[in-house]
Amino acid sequence: MAQNLKCDFCSAPKVSKSYACEDFTPEDMPISLSVGGWAACDICAGLIDSDQFEVLAERSTRTFLASLGLPDSGQFKAEILGFMRRLHQEFNRCRLKVN
């Protein structure tokens, strides 16, 4: 994998797995289009592979808030967590599950 990749779920600098995914446009979300595959670190890949999407959403929310220096609580956290849940649901729906 390319050296400059980071985890698309938590922004960890070490990517260990990629997931092929159809392009999708999330409805009612502040991003316009997801194109191509998603990269994941060991921890996030483990959560995806074991269908622990609620834990993944919580992890993504926590690391996103920390990257902005924001507290891991309050109404903004609840909104971001809801966004992460919907985004990961769309990712899971559109990912290409290959054996």
Image: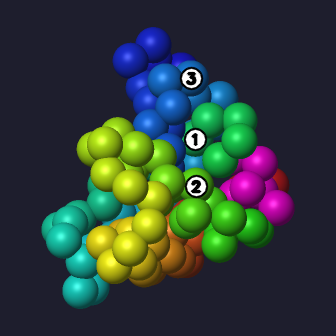
Q: Residue 75 at what x, y percent from top left?
A: 34, 79
Which residue type does callout 1 highlight?
Ala
Distance CA(mark 2)–CA(mark 3): 16 Å
Q: Residue at point 44% right, 67% down?
A: 73
Classed neighbour count for the residue bearing mark 1: other residues with Cα under 10 Å, few (<14), some (14–19), many (≥20): many
Question: N-terminal of the two: label 2 or label 1?
Answer: 1
Badge 1 element:
strand
- On whether residue 8 falls in the magenta region, the answer is no
* Quarter occupied by residue 99: bottom right
Which residue type does callout 3 highlight?
Lys
Instruction: In this rendered view, identify the residue nearer to me: 74 or 66.
Output: 74
Is residue 96 positioned above or below 79 on the image? above
Is residue 9 positioned above or below 6 on the image? below
Badge 2 element:
helix
Look at mark 3 in the image and give the residue it sits on.
Answer: 14
Magenta region: which residues?
45-50
